[in-house]
Amino acid sequence: MTFDSLVLYGVTHEVTAALLGARVSRVFMPAPDTAVLEFSRREQPHQLLLSWKPQYARVHLTLGQEPERGLACSFVDVLRRFLRGARLESAAQVGFDRVFSLAFSNAENLGPDSRCLLLIEPIGRWANAMLLDASRVIREAARHVPATVNRYRVLLPGEPYAPPPGADLPPLSRVTAEALRRAAADRPEATLGVLLMRGFQGASPLLLAELWARTGLDPQSPCARQPTGWAASLQEAIGDLLREAAEPGGYLYRPPDAPPLAYPARLFSLPEISPEAHPSLSAALEIAFAEQIAAAQARATRARLQAAVTRARQAVARRRQAREAAAQAAAEAARWREYGEALLANLWRLAPGASQVEVPHYTAEGERLLTIPLNPNYSPQDNAQRYFERYKKAQRTARTLPTLLEADRREEEYLEELADQIERADLPDLSELEEELRRRRYLKRPVSPARRRPESPPIPRLVAPQGWTLWYGKTGLQNDRLLHEASPDDLWFHVADGPGGHVLLRTGGRPEQVPETALHFAARLAAGLSRRRSDRAVEVAVTLAKHVRKPRGAPPGFVLYSHASTRTVEPLYPPPRAESL
């Protein structure tokens, strides 16, 4: 997510217009490495969000933020002490750098002459925030940087504030054509792109790409080879961008293979993307960062849940293999009984301490010799008894193993479906899948008793052709709730012979009146909710909901059905945007 100098330039204008002269009413943390200053206004409170989290460093106006319980930070405690009741005197961008300065009076409620300065530096992985006193000495910093980490810029309480590198460069926002020509004359061998990037403050890759798109200049060519008037053209393009950034509003871009992007000006460098216009840059930034944070949380949660499912699948596979080996051993039960009978019949032949014996054994087919392994530590009678015990155990195993192996097979199918659900789930569905894993004890529950169980996301709903309503499940728990809410005459759809989501077509007691277009749409949706969603043709089972049942003790989403017909359809994936019940 880009938060460059032009974005901060636009935010500075919004903060100045909204908060100048307002007083801070409270300071709190809505998330880790994030603080909110709430300002009291006559019409309504205003909030300013400051984040020094490296991946999401930013500052912008916000609304509706509330404290997150359990979060604490010494920097925020110091802000609360100094800024509650303080009056915002100015908001400014330092030069054209990513440094935002907020000047307050009445610090610590000691009157108008008691002043302090809050600096926010949303500079990516070096992001930080500091509170300075009137003499620019650091009172507290969000991130302490000792001399052992950076001896040129120590950021600790009691140390004088030092600006970030590049503070001595001329700001790109105030550049003139003459200054550009002088810089080019000083570095004749440098390309135009390198000249701006290294010689001026605030020249981000996105801002430079926009300048090249607006001017048509080649950043890879030296300045001496640029067309006549290149410096004036750049000055004009920079001025246009600054004027656009100073105006109310912002644009939200969603590149197909990159995170969402909020910018204060329309980007000529992304002509293939139609932006969303928003009434303020802060509103666009809030949406873009919220989507990026949600996507990162979804990736992390998805990886954690997939790891848990993988562990569970490996455990079930090991258990099944052990049971299959036990089933093979149980098939030899008759041999253990034969050994025991032969030993008892030939006790007089056996010498104590032997490890093996060869004795005759009489059967209906005649006499044959048996070679029987013995434990030399046991008597001949005890060896015979141990073989009879192995025979009885093998018989018990032979009776119970088919049921256990069938349970293993069902669990493996369930885990396979669970892995597919996790792969295509969004963040709310991942939260429900996590709860499902905890209920099945594939994940441990958190130790803290204060953490509440997350609310289940609503069942998605679609309107099929001709107005028929469809419900569908994307997780096992949603599939269970869907079946619980179904009426007997609703139509139930599921991919035939494979894992997938359930689809319910609400018939209102009139299944025979559902048109073919609605049936076809529901079948395509069910095919798209299965692992075969990339196939060209998929068979889907259709039956009435009264013919679908969930066996006692079955995992979430597992059902048995009867009286089904099948349809072969092309999967509908991704599904259309759903409403929620």
Image: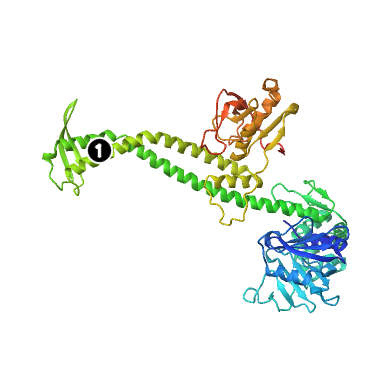
In x, y percent, where is residue 419?
56, 43
Residue 494 in view here: yes
**Quadrant including the N terminus:** bottom right
Q: Residue furthest top?
A: 512
- Residue 55 quadrant: bottom right
Question: Callout 1: 10 Å neighbours few (<14), some, many (20+)?
Answer: many
Q: Residue furthest left?
A: 348
- Is 347 on the left-hand or right-hand side of 502? left
Specify the amino acid type for callout 1.
Answer: Phe
Here the colouring is: rainbow
Residue plotted at (40% across, 34% down)? 402
In x, y percent, where is residue 194?
74, 64
Residue plotted at (70% across, 76% down)? 157
**Quadrant including the C terminus:** top right
- Is 364 on the left-hand or right-hand side of 71? left
In x, y percent, where is residue 230?
85, 61
Q: Secondary structure at mark 1?
A: helix
Q: Is residue 305 above or below residue 411?
A: below
- Residue 61 quadrant: bottom right
Where does label 1 land, which residue? 388
Q: Is residue 443 above or below residue 513?
A: below
- Is 293 on the left-hand or right-hand side of 447? right
Q: Nearer the viewer, residue 428 or 488?
A: 488
Q: Nearer the viewer, residue 236 or 548?
A: 548
